[in-house]
Structure formats: structure tokens, C-alpha cells
Image (cartoon, rainbow, N blue to C red):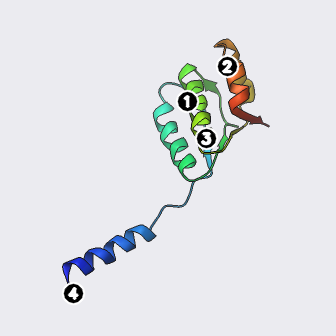
Amino acid sequence: MSAAMTTRRRTSAVKRARPRAVRTVRIGPLLTINEVAGTRAALDRMLAGGGARADARGLESIDTAGLQLLLAAARAAQERGLKLRLEGGQRLVRGAAEALGLAAQLTAAVELST
């Protein structure tokens, strides 16, 4: 078997072995500056897979970096024709948004559901 043929077979095997699309990302219990990097990677994977739902029912704490991350994810979702849906954690997220003067942006960008 030629080297080119072997390479083609490996390439097509790699193309078929795609990871399952992530539709929902679980957020919490903390969404603070220490956790945003890992959460951002998960949100990016979710959006790339066509998902736009974040489960924040276990959220206990959010800071400015966490709120910024949610707004950035919402913007990225909008660029893909989606709207980020946040399930749970509304009180905390809204409180943080109001304290930072970002309540209007949050309401416009993120669908908050119970």
C-alpha cells in the first residue's frame, strides 16, 4: 500500500471520529475570575456545536468576570443566529448585572428562564 493511500485512510478515519456536540453547559457553583477560563472553553465548544443553553441552577457566586463571560457568550451566540438561554441562577446574575449597570445589556442578550 502506498504512503499516500495510508494517509488518506487515516485522514478519513479522523474526520469520522468527531466528538458529540455539546448542547448545554453546566455552570457553577462559582462563576468568578478563577473559573472563567474553563467555563469559557466549555461555552465555546457548546456554541460551536450549535447549542446555546447554560444550566446555572447550581450557581452560588458570580463576579464581574463571570458576568462578562456570559455577555461575551451571548454575543457569540447572536453572531451564530442563536440566543443564549440561562436556566437558573437568575437572581444572582441579575443582581450582578444591576450592580454593574449592565442589566439592560443582560436582558437584551440573554434569555433568563427558571
Badge 4 amino acid: Met
- In this rendering, position of residue 100 left or right of residue 33: right
Badge 2 amino acid: Ala
- In this rendering, position of residue 29 left or right of residue 2: right
Q: Position of residue 14 (x, y in %)?
A: 38, 68
Query: Is disc 4 in contact with disc 3, using a CB cutoff of under 8 Å?
Result: no
Is 42 in front, or is 109?
109
Label 3 belongs to which residue?
77
- Residue at point 61%, 41% (across, down): 77
Specify the label residue 69 is tagged with: 1
Measured in 3D between alpha carbons, the distance from the residue under mark 1 to the one under mark 3, in whole angstroms, is 12 Å
Q: Position of residue 92 (x, y in %)?
A: 70, 24
Specify the label residue 97 is tagged with: 2
Measured in 3D between alpha carbons, the distance from the residue under mark 2 to the one under mark 1, in whole angstroms, is 12 Å
Is 3 in front, or is 79?
79
Is 39 in front, or is 83?
83
Q: Is residue 59 above or below residue 19?
A: above
Badge 1 amino acid: Leu
Is any atom of residue 16 visible in this view? yes
Farthest right residue in view: 114
Query: Is disc 1 in contact with disc 3, using a CB cutoff of under 8 Å?
Result: no
Specify the label residue 102 is tagged with: none
Badge 3 amino acid: Ala
Label 4 belongs to which residue?
1
- Residue at point 56%, 31% (across, down): 72
